[in-house]
Image: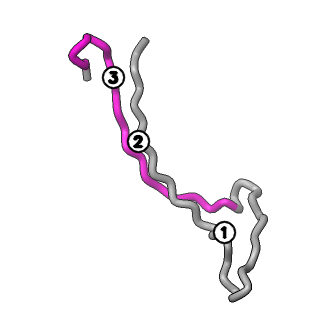
Amino acid sequence: MVDPWGNTKAGFEINGKVNRKDFGLNWSAVTEAGGVVVSDEVKLHLNVELAKG
């Protein structure tokens, strides 16, 4: 798309999830109540805007 000043731009919304252990992030801890501090599943929500220079 072209903005009011004539600049070409593109925007994207990206949603997904990854397993942090797939990237070697194996650290974890347990709370006093026995709950996990860090989940294996990490949710990603990205809003990206690109401008052509």
Q: Is residue 8 highlighted in magenta? A: yes
Which residue was labeled with disc 1? 38
Residue 14 tag number? none
Q: Toward which corner of the image does residue 32 lie, by quadrant?
A: bottom right
Which residue was labeled with disc 2? 47
Q: Distance between the residues labelled 2 and 1?
A: 24 Å
Question: Residue 2 appears at what percent x and percent y?
Answer: 25, 18
Q: Is residue 21 highlighted in magenta? A: no
Q: Which residue is more in the foreground, 22 or 3?
A: 3
Question: Residue 52 appears at what percent x and percent y?
Answer: 40, 16
Q: Which of marks 3 and 1 is in front?
A: 1
**Along the polypeptide, which appears first: circle 3 or circle 1?**
3
Q: Distance between the residues labelled 3 and 1?
A: 37 Å
Which residue was labeled with disc 3? 9
Q: How far apart are marks 2 and 3 (CA)?
A: 13 Å
Mark 1 burial class by Cα count in 10 Å: few <14, some 14-19, many 20+: few
Q: Is mark 1 on a helix, strand or loop?
A: loop
Q: Residue at x 76, y 73 (%)?
A: 29
Q: What element carries label 3?
A: strand
User: What colouring method underlies this structural image?
Assistant: one colour
